Amino acid sequence: MSDPLPSDATLHWNLAILRGAMFNDGTAILPYRQQIKDVLRLLLNKTLSKRGFAWTGRLLFSVLLSCTHTYPLENRWVNPEEWYSAEFLHSHHKYWGKLYAPGEAKVGPNSYCCVQRVKC
């Protein structure tokens, strides 16, 4: 990669932070889609260094990944009545690695459904 100019280091740092913020549920970034589009358009037009252009591509990749991935609605590793119990709240470490026999695990109808497809 090219050697960054001192002024570019701040840009690269901020792009890295912005990219980290984009790793999210796509519905969380949806309200900001116009601002994200504006930033990407500005970066594509104004970022001329190899490193800056690469970071812009990574940012675009992160946005697209967030908008196209699906996420489980529930991510619990014990049954709901255990999850909400006072004992579990105070000693959840005792449940780590708990195995259920077939038929004991209570899986809700929406447990494996994914969030709505996000239209960015």
Image (tube, helix red, strand yellow):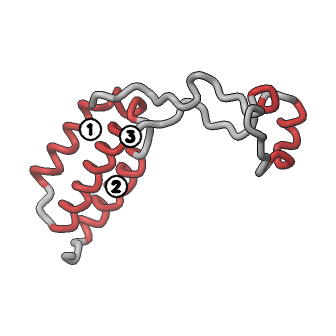
Please tell me which of labels 2 and 3 falls first in the chain: 2
Label 1 crowding class (10 Å Cα cut-off): few <14, some 14-19, many 20+? some
Q: Which residue is mark 1?
A: 36
Label 2 crowding class (10 Å Cα cut-off): few <14, some 14-19, many 20+? few
Q: Is residue 19 left or right of residue 5?
A: right
Compute the Cα span from label 2 to label 3.
24 Å
Secondary element under disc 1, as helix, strand or loop, is helix
Please provide percent x and percent y for residue 49.
15, 66
Identify which residue, 90 or 116, lies in the foreground: 116
Q: Is residue 75 left or right of residue 12?
A: right
Label 3 crowding class (10 Å Cα cut-off): few <14, some 14-19, many 20+? some
Q: Which residue is mark 2?
A: 14
Q: Amino acid at mark 1?
A: Ile
> Quick one: quadrant of the N terminus?
bottom left
Q: Are marks 1 and 2 in contact (CB under 8 Å)?
A: no
Please tell me which of labels 1 and 2 falls first in the chain: 2
Nearer the observer: mark 1 or 3; the answer is 3
Q: Which mark is residue 98?
A: none
Residue at position x 19%, y 76% in the image: 2
Residue at position x 60%, y 32% in the image: 74
Secondary element under disc 3, as helix, strand or loop, is loop
Q: Amino acid at mark 3?
A: His
Nearer the observer: mark 2 or 3; the answer is 3
Residue at position x 15%, y 57% in the image: 47
Q: Which residue is mark 3?
A: 69
Q: Amino acid at mark 2?
A: Asn
Please provide percent x and percent y for residue 6.
26, 71
Secondary element under disc 2, as helix, strand or loop, is helix
Please tell me which of labels 1 and 3 falls first in the chain: 1
